[in-house]
Amino acid sequence: MHQIVSAPVDTSRRWWVLATVVAAQFMFGVDAFIVNVAIPTIATELHASAAQIEAVIAIYLIAYATLVVTGGRLGDIYGARNVFIAGVAGFTVTSLWCGLAQSGPELIAARLAQGATAALMVPQVLATLHLLFADASRARAFGIYGIVLGLAGAAGFLLGGILVTLDLAGIGWRAVFFVNVPFGVAIIAAAWKIMPSFQRRAGTRLDIPGAIVLFLGLLCLIGPLLFGHDLHWSPLTWLVMAAGVGIVAALLRLERAIARRGGSR
């Protein structure tokens, strides 16, 4: 995931860069938890089933976990700064989509897209810290990163409770997603102005088949657990779960085959 740098990197504003990228990491962490507080009002307003509400939470993390390695490699190919800005922009737009969703399935789709864009944004945070803090300040920088990461969960619950209780402008639960929009725009503006460009890593390839197979496998394994009750645990749910096991097993064979061919570097 880390890039090879053959040219000097401007580190004069690295602490400001640290604040910018860690703010994006914080926004991602908050969104993993903030929706939990709004679940009752989301379920009522969108007439969403319990399974759909569980999927709103789970699909965000499934999309992120599936694509995070791909996001890191895209940073190697196109540069951490470019992919970071693209990821934050995507996260901002999909957050707006989440807030505008009119049904349970639409909110699930929006959360899927939100998790996918987070997978572009988050890997660039650690890559940037590794590149900018190669001296004795690295421990301090990663300490700040760790503190922010730890606070994100608690802040998500607190902020979610405040926003739902205040019911700003009568928008209710939608505020927990809309709040990302101004913060996302501010992060993009800061990154565009102060984040340095890094040398791209030549020869890096994407493992697109692996990412697709992993996503399908996780979806087949977790989906029936979410919707099994609504489907009365029909034979189809068990068949889909069995297919998920087979897909994950196929992923292991696929990755071994890629490794034998020299890997994806």
Image: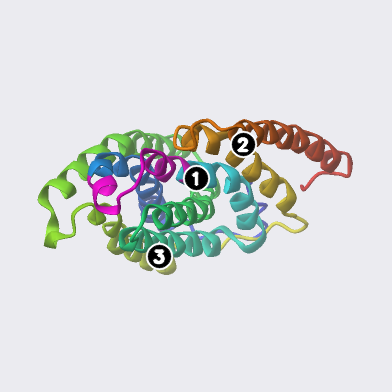
Foreground: 34 or 84?
34
- Local SS, label 2: helix
Position of residue 70 measured from the top left corner of the image (x, y, whole percent): 63, 51
Dot 1 crowding, Cα within 10 Å, few <14, some 14–19, many 20+: some
Query: Which numbered dot is residue 133?
Result: 1
Residue located beneath label 3 in the image? 93
Is 206 on the left or on the right of 65, as rendered?
right
Magenta-span inclusion, residue 58 = yes
The part of the chain drawn in magenta is 41-59
Determine the image quadrant of residue 97: bottom left
Of the numbered discs 2 and 3, the one sitting upstream in the chain is 3
- Local SS, label 3: helix
Foreground: 256 or 101?
101
Disc 3 from disc 1: Cα separation: 31 Å
Dot 3 crowding, Cα within 10 Å, few <14, some 14–19, many 20+: many
Q: Amino acid at mark 3?
A: Val
Foreground: 106 or 25?
106
Q: Is residue 159 visible?
A: yes
Disc 2 from disc 3: Cα separation: 35 Å
Is 128 on the left or on the right of 145, as rendered?
right
Magenta-span inclusion, residue 43 = yes
Q: Amino acid at mark 1?
A: Phe
Of the numbered discs 3 and 1, the one sitting upstream in the chain is 3
* Nearer mark to the viewer, of 2 and 3: 2
Dot 2 crowding, Cα within 10 Å, few <14, some 14–19, many 20+: few
Position of residue 31 measured from the top left corner of the image (x, y, whole percent): 35, 46
Q: Amino acid at mark 2?
A: Leu
Q: Main secondary structure of the magenta part?
A: helix
Residue located beneath label 2 in the image? 236
